[in-house]
Amino acid sequence: MGKLEGKVAVITGGSSGMALASARKFVEEGAYVFITGRRQEQLDEAVKLIGRNVTGVRGDAANLDDLDRLFETVKREKGKIDVLYASAGTGNAAMLGDITEQHFDAEFGLNTRGTLFTVQKALPLFNDGGSIFMTGSVASVKGFPGFGVYAASKAALRSFARTWLNELKGRNIRVNVLSPGPIATPMQEEVLTKEAKEMFESLIPRGKMGQSEEIATAALFLASDDSNFVNGVDLAVDGGFSAI
């Protein structure tokens, strides 16, 4: 029997990268998974790749109407949620002095506001004893030039977790943050130059980027009963990147 046998999981931003790898892992472990993505073609490819026990719902986690449609679909098809992995996010560089209102709104609108309303709108369907976790970033505890807004938008999730676990303790719902280090993903290819990638790799003790599957293993831990006594943590999965 898999570690998520009979569970229903929702993963936002699940059409690529770390969240897609996690969706595949969850299905392998017995879960039924709902994934979201903004681009229908990419979402369809992700559903095809996962292969079974999956529903793709196109939508933007920063759009509250799209979130309503997501959870209406979950309610109609399964009627419950056991695991919520709020992973949809964005990260673009802008140095202090060059930060625009549009840049700030985009980063906080998806990473922080979108995560908050994803969790809030999921709660009516949530089973007691379930697991909520969010994609943070080790950038929130570092000070990388150009990523101040992104880091701040992710740092807020740590605060959310502390408050929400207290508010949800009567239902025994755990709330954690999964904070990856530098991971080789399609988004990383879009936002980092070759020089930036080499710089980040030089700061990882093993000398190479993390892989999406390594994040998926940690996500499975937080989703499953293996982490029953883990609540309110910011779990850095970064190969030691943030420790040195």
Image: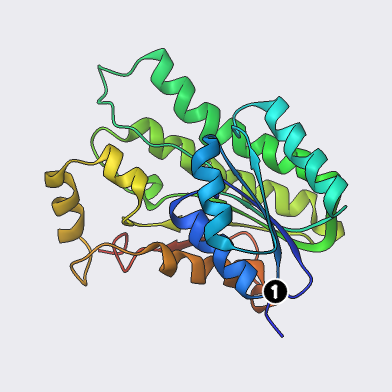
User: How many discs mark residues in the rendered view?
Assistant: 1
Describe residue 35's horizontal placement relative to residue 188 as left or right.
right
Q: What kind of element bears circle 1? A: loop
Relative to 137, does residue 31 appear above or below in the rendering? below
Picture residue at 70% right of the left edge, 34% below the top: 67
Nearest to the observer: residue 148 or residue 29: 29
Q: How is the image coloured?
A: rainbow
State the residue position of label 1: 30
Nearest to the observer: residue 218 or residue 99: 218
Relative to 216, does residue 135 appear above or below in the rendering? above
Place of residue 58 in the rendered image (x, y in percent of width and height, measured from the top left):
62, 37
Which quarter of the rendered picture does the N terminus lie within? Answer: bottom right
Q: Is residue 47 visible?
A: yes
Furthest residue in direction left, as rendered: 195
Amino acid under disc 1: Gly
Q: Is residue 13 visible?
A: no
Picture residue at 17% right of the left edge, 45% below the top: 196
Furthest residue in direction bottom, as rendered: 1
Describe residue 2's horizontal placement relative to residue 94 as left or right.
right
Picture residue at 68% right of the left edge, 81% below the top: 2
Describe residue 180's horizontal placement relative to residue 78 as left or right.
left
Furthest residue in direction top, as rendered: 101
Residue 124: image quadrant is top right
Nearest to the observer: residue 68 or residue 51: 51
